[in-house]
């Protein structure tokens, strides 16, 4: 197959399009990055695939070679029509407003995307809220968002996204991508992460998301202050929380960024926030 820049040029000529800033389009043109993404998809042993934002097909052309059911989600009307004319299943909808249950047929589904950056955090949260569905994901992010997702305890970018994503997925870095790996070049560096679904004790994921959100509501505030509202709803006292923190080896002045994802789950379960 010809290289990605040639494929992009041919597809753009066929579609008569340029990248749209309004849709956050920056088209991937690095054969190395593309190959690493596809290799990671293959390593997850997919039985079906869903791709958000195929654009001119940097990934799509190679995903098709896997000869698996492929569902495309594309907001750009012209691009959606292009892939439909090639006989592919395309939903011309917003990936965040779509009911993803329609894709969950029991087959091992892998979600792959060079994501539009404005939806990247939200789509990770959405997929993490589901108890089942996507088995694994290979997704491109703005580098800073990827660092938040993989953030470690005490790190500057460790926060809500780190805790919530790491509770439900085993996450690894696949590759980095610089501005020159895209056309037009974005102003930011990018990073591809892989996500593999893991078992979790959390049953009510929405409640857990609300709990972690509260914990990180104001980063400079102490955990006991950020959680005071939730504690009072549950008729729990600050002293009970301080007691638990002490048992776990924390001072009563602990902040949310000092607790690991595992400790967040322990705290959440211990005080029955799930019920």
Image (tube, rainbow, N blue to C red):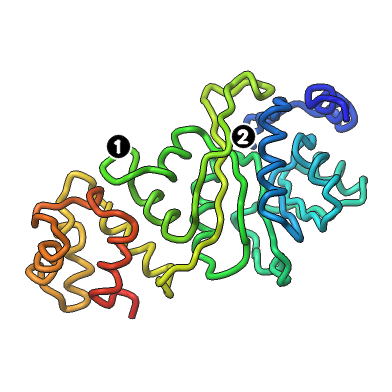
Q: Is residue 53 left or right of residue 96?
A: right
SS state under label 2: loop
Mark 1 or mark 2: whose residue is earlier in sequence: 2
Q: Is residue 21 left or right of residue 240?
A: right
In the image, residue 65 sits, relative to residue 225, either above or below, namely: above
Residue at (33% x, 60% y) in the render = 262
Instruction: Report whether 206 appears left or right of 51.
Output: left
Q: Is residue 127 above or below residue 274?
A: above
Kindly identify the residue that appears in the image at 76 percent across and 34 percent down.
58
Whole-percent x and y of residue 59? 75, 39
Q: Residue furthest bottom?
A: 275
> As drawn, which residue projects farthest toward the front?
43
Identify residue for label 1.
156
Total count of labels:
2
- In the image, what residue occupies the spot 72% across and 48% down? 42
At horizontal 57% and vertical 38% (from top left) the residue drawn is 174
Within 10 Å of the Cα at label 2, are there few (<14), some (14-19), or many (20+) other Cα atoms?
Answer: some
Disc number placed over residue 171 in the picture, else none: none
Which one is nearer the viewer's eye here, 274 or 118?
274
Q: Indicate which disc residue 24 carries.
A: 2
Mark 1 residue element: loop
- Nearer the viewer's eye, disc 1 or disc 2? 1
Q: Residue 202: image x %, image y %?
A: 40, 71
Please, is residue 154 above or below residue 183 in the view?
Answer: below
């Amino acid at each position: 197959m010809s290289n990605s820049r040639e494929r992009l040029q041919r597809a753009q000529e066929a579609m008569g399009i340029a990248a749209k800033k309004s849709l956050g389009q920056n088209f991937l043109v690095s054969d190395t990055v593309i190959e690493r993404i596809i290799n990671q998809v293959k390593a997850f042993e997919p039985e079906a695939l869903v791709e958000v934002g195929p654009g001119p097909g940097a990934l799509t052309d190679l995903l098709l070679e896997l000869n698996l059911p492929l569902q495309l989600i594309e907001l750009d009307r012209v691009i959606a029509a292009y892939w439909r004319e090639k006989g592919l299943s395309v939903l011309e909808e917003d990936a965040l407003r779509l009911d993803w249950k329609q894709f969950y047929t029991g087959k091992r589904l892998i979600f792959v995307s060079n994501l539009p950056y404005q939806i990247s955090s939200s789509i990770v949260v959405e997929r993490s809220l589901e108890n089942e569905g996507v088995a694994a994901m290979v997704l491109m992010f703005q580098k800073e968002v990827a660092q938040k997702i993989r953030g470690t305890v005490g790190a500057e970018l460790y926060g809500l996204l780190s805790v919530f994503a790491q509770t439900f997925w085993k996450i690894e870095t696949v590759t980095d991508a610089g501005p020159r790996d895209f056309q037009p070049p974005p102003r930011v560096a990018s990073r591809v992460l892989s996500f593999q679904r893991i078992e979790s004790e959390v049953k009510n994921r929405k409640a857990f998301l609300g709990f972690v959100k509260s914990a990180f509501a104001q980063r400079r505030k102490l955990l006991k202050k950020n959680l005071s509202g939730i504690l009072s709803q549950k008729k729990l006292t600050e002293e009970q929380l301080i007691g638990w923190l002490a048992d776990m080896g924390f001072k009563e002045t602990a902040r949310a960024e000092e607790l690991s994802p595992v400790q967040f789950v322990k705290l959440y379960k211990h005080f029955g926030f799930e019920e």
